[in-house]
C-alpha cells in the first residue's frame, strides 16, 4: 500500500492546484472552529468570573436575616423587624455542630471624614470572626481582637475603595478617621475583593467592632440587637445541615410555635450562586452547540467539494488504478485530502478564534478564557469532520471501474 | 511457458433483451518476447480483449493465465497488484497526470509498491533517460510534444520492469513521423530488452512493425499470422 507521506504529497498538490476552491472550502471549517473556540471561551469566561465572585462572597456562607413586621395587615420586608441579637449569634456558634464560625453584623450607611476629604460608605459593626466568614484577608495592619469588641474601642478596618477615596496614595494605618463625627483609629486595611455578583463594589466598606457600632454609631432600640448574622458552615456538605440546625435553634430561642411563621430567614448564599453558575454553564453549552452546527455545515461543504473533485479527477483515478493503485490507496488519497483541508482550516480557525476571544474581552468587556481543552477538541473535531465527510467521496472514487474511469472525458 | 495463455474467453454484455458477445471463445497464447499487433474494426472485440489481458476487466467465462498465474478469479486489489508488477500500459491519449512533472508521472507506479522515495526518483530518472528525455524531468505534460508525452507514458509503463507492455492505439494521436519514431522505439524495446508487446491498432502500416498479427471480428479471432522478418 502507498505510504502516508506520498499520499500527503499528492493531496497537497491537488489542493494547491485549486487554491481558490480549497480556500473557500476551508472557510467553512475556519468559521466553524473559530466560532466554537470563541463561544467556549466566552462561556468559560463567564462561568469563571461567576465562580470568582462566589469565592469573594466567602465559601460555604449562610446569612441569617431578621423577619418582617406585620402591622395592620401590612407586611414589611425582611429586616423591618429587628429580631436577631448578638446572643443568637453566640448560641448558633455554640450549639450548631455544622457551623464553623459566626459573625453578627449591624450595618448602615455613614459619612466618613479624613482631613479635608469625606465619603459616604457602608459601615459594618461586626466581630473579629467576620474576616474568616468571608474569606477576606488583610492587606495590612491587624484584625480586631476580643478586647476591641468587649471594650467598644474606636478602631476600624478600611476597604480599598474607602482608602482610595479618603487617603489617595497615603498609608492610612494609625491615622484617625471620623465616622458620624466619632474619631476612629485605622488599625487595618482589607484586601481588594472587587465587584460582587450583582456588581456592587465590595471594597466600599468599613468594619468597626460590633459593640462600638451599637453604642456609638447606630443607636439600637434593643440592647445587643444585630441586623444580620453571617455564618460559615464547616464544609460545603454541611451547608444544608447547618441551615436546619440554625432554623431549629432560632425557632426555639424566639419561642415560635409549631404553626407560626419564622421571624427570621436563613439564606444559603453559596447555593444561590451555584445555581447562577449552573445557568451560565448551560448557556455556554448552548453557545457551543450552536457554534458546532456551523462546523457541521463546514464539513458538508468539504464533502460537497470532495465529491466534485472525485468526478473531476475520474481519469486520474483510472490512471492510478491502471498502474496498480488498490482500493485503499485511492480511498486514503481522498480521505487525506479531506483531512488536510479540515485540519488546515481547523488550525486557522483556532488562531482566528483566539484572536476573536481576545478582541471580545478587550472591546466588549466580556471575560473570555481560552481553554487548551477547547483547542484540542476543535482540532480533533475538525480532523473527524475531514474523515467523516471525506469518506463517502473517497469510497465512491475507489469503486470506479478502471476502464470507464480511463475513458472518462 | 506462455506469458499469456487464454482458453475459451467469453465476455458477454447484456443490453436490454439482447446479448452482445464481445469475446466469443477466444483462445490465444503469446510467448515471452513476442511483438503482437491486434487488429480489427471497431466493435470487433479487440479492446475488450486488451482490457481482459490487461487485467482491467474480468471475462464472463474462460480461463486466463498471465505468467502462469490464473488471474480470472482474482479480486480488484489482487488484479491491481498484478497490473503493477507485470503490465505496463500505453494509451492513445497518453493518460499522463496533468500539472505533474514527467518525473513524478513516471514515479506513480512505484508509489503503489512501496519503493523507497530515493530509489523511486533514481528509477524514474533512468527510465526517462533511456527514452531520450534527459532534461525534461521537470516539464509538465502540457510543455511536452505529443511524441515526448507518449515517451513519458512508455517510461512509466517500463519503470517497474514489467515483462508485458500493452499499447492501445499508441500512435493514434501522433503525426506520421512521430508514429514511426514511437514504433521504432517499441521494436527496440522488444528486441533489445526482450519486452513482450501487445499493441492494438487499425493501421496496417503500424501493425507492420510487429512480428505477429491477430485479427478480430465479432468477438472471434479470424486470423493469427506470424510475419516473417
Image (cartoon, rainbow, N blue to C red):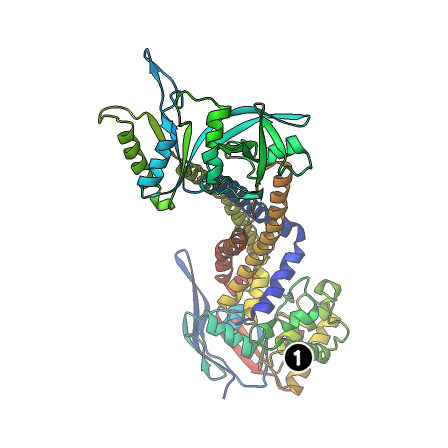
- Residues A75 and B192: in front is A75
- The x, y position of residue B193, in whole percent, is 64, 86
Q: Secondary structure at mark 1?
A: helix
Does residue A128 appear in this view? Answer: no
Q: Which residue is mark 1?
A: B123
- Residues A383 and A186: in front is A186
Q: Residue furthest left?
A: A258
At x 60% / y 32%, what residue is drawn?
A162
Considering only vertical position in the picture, is A298 above or below B10?
above
- Residues A111 and B144: in front is A111
At x 66% / y 50%, what residue is drawn?
A20
Q: Quadrant of residue A315?
A: bottom right
Considering only vertical position in the picture, is A327 above or below B4?
above
Q: Residue furthest right?
A: B135
**Subunit of label 1:** B
Does residue A101 appear in this view? Answer: yes
- The x, y position of residue B58, in whole percent, is 45, 70
- Residues B206 and B122: in front is B122
Amino acid at each position: 500500500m502507498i505510504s502516508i507521506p506520498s499520499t500527503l504529497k499528492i493531496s497537497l498538490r491537488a489542493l494547491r492546484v485549486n487554491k481558490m476552491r480549497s480556500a473557500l472550502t476551508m472557510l467553512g471549517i475556519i468559521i466553524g472552529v473559530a466560532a466554537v473556540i470563541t463561544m467556549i471561551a466566552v462561556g468559560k469566561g463567564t462561568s469563571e468570573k461567576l465562580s470568582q465572585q462566589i469565592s469573594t462572597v466567602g465559601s460555604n456562607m449562610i446569612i441569617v436575616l431578621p423577619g418582617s413586621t406585620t402591622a395592620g395587615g401590612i407586611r414589611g420586608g425582611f429586616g423591618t423587624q429587628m429580631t436577631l441579637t448578638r446572643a443568637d449569634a453566640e448560641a448558633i456558634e455554640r450549639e450548631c455542630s455544622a457551623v464553623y464560625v459566626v459573625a453578627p453584623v449591624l450595618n448602615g450607611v455613614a459619612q466618613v471624614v479624613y482631613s479635608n476629604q469625606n465619603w459616604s460608605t457602608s459601615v459594618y459593626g461586626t466581630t473579629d470572626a467576620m474576616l474568616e466568614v468571608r474569606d477576606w484577608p488583610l492587606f495590612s495592619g491587624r484584625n480586631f481582637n476580643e478586647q476591641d469588641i468587649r471594650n467598644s474601642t474606636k478602631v476600624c478596618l478600611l476597604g480599598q475603595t474607602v482608602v482610595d477615596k479618603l487617603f489617595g496614595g497615603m498609608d492610612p494605618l494609625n491615622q484617625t478617621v471620623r465616622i458620624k463625627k466619632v474619631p476612629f483609629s485605622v488599625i487595618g486595611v482589607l484586601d481588594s475583593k472587587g465587584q460582587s455578583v450583582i456588581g456592587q463594589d465590595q471594597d466600599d466598606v468599613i468594619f468597626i467592632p460590633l459593640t462600638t457600632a451599637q453604642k456609638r454609631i447606630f443607636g439600637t432600640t434593643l440592647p445587643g440587637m444585630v441586623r444580620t448574622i453571617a455564618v460559615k458552615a464547616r464544609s460545603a456538605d454541611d451547608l444544608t445541615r447547618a441551615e436546619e440546625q440554625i432554623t431549629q435553634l432560632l425557632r426555639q430561642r424566639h419561642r415560635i410555635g409549631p404553626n407560626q411563621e419564622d421571624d427570621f430567614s436563613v439564606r444559603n448564599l453559596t447555593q444561590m450562586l451555584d445555581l447562577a453558575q449552573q445557568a451560565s454553564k448551560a448557556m455556554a453549552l448552548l453557545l457551543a452547540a450552536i457554534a458546532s452546527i456551523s462546523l457541521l455545515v463546514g464539513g458538508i461543504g468539504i464533502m460537497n467539494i470532495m465529491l466534485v473533485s472525485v468526478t473531476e479527477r475520474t481519469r486520474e483515478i483510472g490512471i492510478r488504478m491502471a498502474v496498480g493503485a488498490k482500493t485503499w490507496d485511492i480511498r486514503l488519497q481522498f480521505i487525506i485530502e479531506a483531512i488536510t483541508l479540515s485540519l488546515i482550516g481547523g488550525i486557522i480557525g483556532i488562531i482566528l478564534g483566539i484572536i476573536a476571544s481576545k478582541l471580545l474581552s478587550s472591546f466588549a468587556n466580556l471575560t473570555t478564557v481560552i481553554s487548551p481543552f477547547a483547542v484540542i477538541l476543535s482540532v480533533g473535531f475538525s480532523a473527524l469532520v475531514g474523515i467523516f465527510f471525506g469518506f463517502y467521496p473517497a469510497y465512491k472514487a475507489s469503486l470506479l471501474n478502471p476502464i470507464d474511469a480511463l475513458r472518462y472525458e | 511457458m506462455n506469458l499469456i495463455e487464454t482458453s475459451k474467453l467469453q465476455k458477454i454484455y447484456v443490453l436490454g433483451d439482447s446479448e452482445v458477445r464481445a469475446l466469443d471463445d477466444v483462445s490465444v497464447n503469446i510467448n515471452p518476447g513476442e511483438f503482437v499487433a491486434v487488429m480489427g474494426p471497431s466493435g470487433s472485440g479487440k479492446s475488450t480483449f486488451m482490457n481482459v489481458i490487461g487485467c482491467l476487466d474480468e471475462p464472463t467465462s474462460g480461463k486466463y493465465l498471465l505468467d502462469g498465474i490464473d488471474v480470472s478469479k482474482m479480486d480488484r486489489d489482487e488484479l491491481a497488484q498484478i497490473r503493477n508488477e507485470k503490465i505496463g500500459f500505453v494509451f492513445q491519449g497518453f493518460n499522463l497526470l496533468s500539472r505533474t512533472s514527467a518525473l513524478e508521472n513516471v514515479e506513480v507506479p512505484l508509489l503503489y509498491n512501496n519503493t523507497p522515495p530515493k530509489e523511486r526518483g533514481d528509477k524514474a530518472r533512468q527510465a526517462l533517460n533511456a527514452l531520450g528525455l534527459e532534461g525534461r524531468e521537470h516539464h509538465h505534460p502540457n510543455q511536452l510534444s505529443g511524441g515526448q508525452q507518449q515517451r513519458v507514458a512508455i517510461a512509466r509503463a517500463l519503470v517497474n520492469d514489467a515483462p508485458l507492455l500493452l499499447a492501445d492505439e499508441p500512435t493514434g494521436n501522433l503525426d506520421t513521423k512521430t508514429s514511426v519514431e514511437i514504433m521504432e522505439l517499441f521494436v527496440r524495446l522488444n528486441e533489445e530488452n526482450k519486452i513482450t508487446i501487445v499493441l492494438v491498432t487499425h493501421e496496417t502500416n503500424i501493425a507492420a512493425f510487429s512480428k505477429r498479427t491477430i485479427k478480430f471480428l465479432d468477438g472471434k479471432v479470424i486470423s493469427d499470422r506470424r510475419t516473417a522478418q
